[in-house]
Amino acid sequence: MIIKFLAYDQSAMFAVTRRSNRAVAIFTILMAAGCTKTSVQPDHPRLTPNVVLRDVTFRSSALSREMQYRVISPAKLFQGQKLPVVYLLHGRGGGYRDWSNYSDVARFAESGLLLVMPEGGSSYYTNAVDPSQDRYEDYIVHDLIADLSSRFPVAEGRGNRAIIGVSMGGFGAVNLALHHPDMFVFVGGISSAVDAPQRAFTIKRLQQSRHFNAIFGAHGSPTRRDNDPFILVRAADPGTAPYFFLTCGGQEGLLPTNREFAGLLAQRHFSYEFHTVPGGHDWNQWNAWLPAVFRSLAEHLGSNADLRQPRVQ
């Protein structure tokens, strides 16, 4: 009797388990479908009447796939007018629409600038170790710049090219400018994650550690050192480096490392400015800094642009 009871109970248990597994599978599929729908963020660019927006899809040779970028330009141009370019890099977890959707940067295009916002994924705008085909640095400095010049009235040359980023994008802007000082005259790092390559592997932040290992390589590796702004700036020539505009919010965990980086710039006599005000790691703080960033930018870009402050709409 005991054996029969156990056999009956076990088969019943298996039946319940199968039904439960099916229910869990159905629930997971439904949740995934729901997440897919809600994960698509609405696109509501904050434009002014005096600018135009254009989204471009092109094939990147460095990445071997289609990539997107957004351009905001003045609505009216003089015949033959060429425009200086400002590359705007988004943060991790964001996308190429972020700058236009979460800030008022579009109004600065009115003063005669091309604002270019490339898709960067979670790449830190670096040529990754793994997968090796994720060559995001080459995508920016070679493919993107070339494609932009083939479609828009670009004023060529270092003196007409700037790069600005927030968070991950701030790291990307600083790192790219240090790797290619001959390409950028101005770099803006807003709440920059400049210490990313220095962060050691930890179980507490396992996913982030694995991500950084894939991008930068193992801690202490040559690829880590080659993408560490603190190491790069010690070897860079202050006389040929771009101008650095750095900011960080007073309530940010990134403030100490940004202060340290600014101190290193001062120690090595780079041309720079560093600001901090109360605020967190968010678009409210970043947007509030844009007038100061573009005022400084106007002092360093080439003479082809009429960089007077645009009207506030």
Image (spheres, helix red, strand yellow):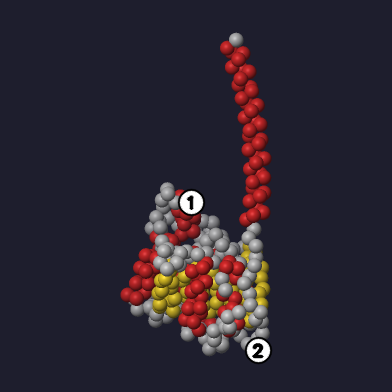
| Nearest to the observer: residue 21 or residue 196 | 21
Q: At 56% from the left edge and 64% from the top edge, which residue is drawn? A: 120
Q: Relative to 190, is 305 above or below?
A: below
Q: Which residue lies furthest to the left in this view?
A: 267
Task: Kindly identify which numbered label has been placed on residue 16.
Answer: none
Of the residues shown, which amino acid type is indicated by label 2?
Phe
| Nearest to the observer: residue 27 or residue 182 | 27
Kindly state the secondary structure of the residue where label 2 is placed: loop
Q: Quick one: label 2, few (<14), some, or many (20+) residues within 10 Å? A: few
| Count of marks, rendered view | 2
Mark 2, residue position: 78
Q: Image quadrant for the N terminus? A: top right
Q: Image quadrant for the C terminus? A: bottom right
**Left or right relative to 232: residue 102:** right
Asked if one can make out residue 64 in the rendered structure from this viewpoint, the answer is yes
Q: Relative to 126, is 106 above or below?
A: below
Q: Relative to 289, is 23 above or below?
A: above
Image location (x, y in percent) of residue 209:
45, 53
Q: Quick one: label 1, few (<14), some, or many (20+) residues within 10 Å? A: few
The answer to which of marks 2 and 1 sits earlier in the sequence is: 2
Q: At 43% from the left edge and 71% from the top edge, which residue is drawn? A: 247
Kindly state the secondary structure of the residue where label 1 is placed: helix
Of the residues shown, which amino acid type is indicated by label 1?
Gln
Q: At 63% from the left edge and 38% from the top edge, which residue is drawn? A: 24
Asked if one can make out residue 144 in the rendered structure from this viewpoint, the answer is no
Mark 1, residue position: 207
Image location (x, y in percent) of residue 176:
48, 71
* Quadrant of res 155: bottom right
